[in-house]
Amino acid sequence: MKSLIISNETIKFLLKRGGSIIFTLIGLSILIFILARILPGDPARMAAGWTAPDWVIEEMRRKLGLDQPLHIQYIRWLSDVLKGDLGFSIYTKRSVTVDVLQYLPKTLELIFVAELFSITGGILLGILAGAFPYRLPDNVVRVMSYIAISMPAFVWAIILQLMFARIIPLFPAGGQLSSHIVPPPRITGSIFIDSIISGRFDALIDCLWHTILPALSLSFGSMMQNARILRMGMTDIKGKDYMVLSDALGLPLRLKIYKYQFRPASIPAITAMGMSIGADLGNAFLVENVYNWPGFSRYGVTAMLNKDLNAIVAVVLVVGIVYAIANFIVDLIILSLDPRIRRMSRSV
Amino acid sequence: MESLLRVEDLNVRYKSYRGELKVLDDVSFEVKVREKVGLIGESGCGKTTLLKSILRILPPNSIIYKGKIFFKNIEIIKANKNEIFKIRRENIGMIFQDPMSALNPFFKVKDQLYDALRYSVHNIKSQQDLQQMIIKLLKEVALSDSERILESYPFELSGGMRQRVCIALALTRSNDLLLADEPTTNLDVTIQEQILNLLRELVNKRGLSIVLVSHALGMVKEFVDKIYVMYAGQIVETASTDKIFSEPLHPYTKLLLSAVPRLTGRWKAEGLIGRLPDYVNPPPGCRFYMRCQQSNSNCKIKPKLLKLNKDHSVACWLYGDEEH
Ligand SMILES: Nc1ncnc2c1ncn2[C@@H]1O[C@H](COP(=O)(O)OP(=O)(O)OP(=O)(O)O)[C@@H](O)[C@H]1O
Ligand SMILES: [Mg+2]
């Protein structure tokens, strides 16, 4: 890790990645900005209401700035965004910034716990299956992954809710906090963090309790996906000359698997984990609906259905940012794991 | 001399989608204490398969169909895990064909040497012990800049340096026998000789036995005492090095020797007419039959490896035919 902080190549790599993220986000914002405006449906009419006469609609259009050419609209929007203002929502009648700050932390909490499940579960099952290919653990994992991957997250959400909230009431069926718990004072908007800061461990535990079922249903697909990719990596690496050499040297099985086989095998799996965070963010919508979770995904879909332009653009942008951050972290992890990326700039 | 390793009638097959590849066919092979043995034969004839069976590190789709391997007094094929691990850690070291892929690119040379030493017979009491042992080891394989080498990843080293690291790894194991599978084939011509000289020096100094697989006949000639010639998974001839070069008997040996390898160390296709038979349905008799200029109807029956005199055996119907 020392070389990770010091090395010139590392800094260059990070700057390059950071630059490409900003570039991507600008591209994404232009794309979604235009896309949201050329899709059918007239936002001014929706904002003014179905019964409004034409002149009211035109008035609304001017008020929203939609009468301006596209590039002017974009430049205005961008300069507002840089000041931290995502515009006005015609549906919630509030600043989109306020909406995002309210809903996003809730979904991030859900995603965070779901990724915790899918990464730890994926690693454990992947190692198990990869260390003993075509044996019992591998076969069990394979069947499990067929089932998990072929069923969408919301089906899992319904099944788990039915089984463990209704039939066997171990967990709450929905919401983020029980009604008898007073919410912690709002500091960051995340109940986890707020209750830790204010020492409200009753709220923390209650909230975690509510998170388990939705997070589990959200994590199954990506957990098994991660396990499969890690398993594939493990078997790939197993046949390499250097693994045959570690056999020839008589190195103990544990050292062989957890050190010499696992690290190279984990690279594609970690990349896949980064990608799956983006997909899980999308899947979160239906799961949030089933569990009545007051999150961002539901907000996003409402925005789409109501042609709430600023909200749509903000939602897509935020998802893009979360995705970019996740992949940036993945890049950092891979950088610290794979010396070839860290040290190869001379020869590649 | 006392026998160190004895392979008897070894048959190794590989499972494939086309059926079983019957690669090694009744291979018998012996290495005595302090003996230097060469194993030659064209690409694909099963040299690596033979070496890997000795350490029981064949790929998972392989089958040891028949045969025995004795190392000292242990029957390797029947041995239990502990005995095998003991042999791998204490007695036999192997050098692989390709130094580019034989080292793990994710770990420093230091890591890989440490772990090899930590699980060896060497009695390591402290970190300093380990450090000293490693530096001594690197000196032995003529890697002088040990600080830098230890902190490097394999891909940061040249091919020759990597092969020296691989030799160092093998040396942590080989108190008796070194299996060198084409240790120079993937190296620059200028480095090939250095590596071979290093090996010879180490083998002599430590009193080891060695099995040297190589295509560089000129170098093999100067290195080993005895040569086995292999064709399509069968030993076709074995004799002292002098005999093999001065009076080769088997038509395949003659062909092999006449096809002088180029500087690259590989036999060229034009030098060796024809191809190896298909291992799924190999000819039931002599496997060289289809390519042989001197074949006759006898050749459809498998010739035994016949001992003509004290140190020369050949498996061919042209010699001592009544006795087969
Ligand atoms: N895992 C495997 N599965 C199927 N066939 C294999 C496997 N390993 C080797 N073979 C086949 O067995 C035969 C002998 O291979 P081997 O590697 O022992 O040859 P070799 O004499 O070492 O050749 P080279 O000089 O190219 O290294 C070849 O035809 C090869 O294709
Ligand atoms: Mg080989």
Image (cartoon, coloured by chain):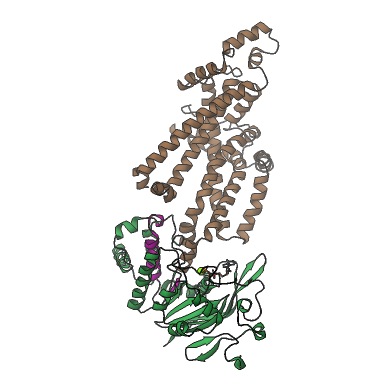
Residue at the (45%, 64%) spot, across then down: B186
B72 in magenta: no
In terms of depth relative to the viewer, which is nearer, A135 or A310?
A310
Q: Quadrant of residue B102?
A: bottom left
Q: Is residue A179 visible?
A: no
Vertical arrangement, residue B62 with respect to residue A83, above or below: below
Residue furthest to the bottom in view is B322
Counting from the top left corner in percent of width and height, residue B305 is at 56, 86
Residue furthest to the top in view is A55
Vertical arrangement, residue A204 with respect to residue A31, above or below: below
Chain A drawing hue: brown
Residue at the (48%, 36%) spot, across then down: A325
Q: Is residue B14 left or right of residue B200?
A: right
Q: Is residue A271 left or right of residue A150?
A: left
Q: Quadrant of residue B162?
A: bottom left
Residue at the (59%, 14%) spot, across then down: A66
B160 in magenta: yes
In terms of depth relative to the viewer, which is nearer, A297 or A320?
A320
Q: Is residue B156 visible?
A: yes
Q: Is residue A273 left or right of residue B19?
A: left
The green-tinted chain is B
Residue furthest to the right in view is A51
Counting from the top left corner in percent of width and height, residue B150 is at 34, 58
Counting from the top left corner in percent of width and height, residue A308 is at 61, 20
Q: Which residues are magenta?
A: B154-181
Counting from the top left corner in percent of width and height, residue B106 is at 43, 54
Vertical arrangement, residue B231 with respect to residue A42, above or below: below
Tell me how many marks there are: 0
Vertical arrangement, residue A139 with respect to residue B289, above or below: above
In terms of depth relative to the viewer, which is nearer, A258 or A5?
A5
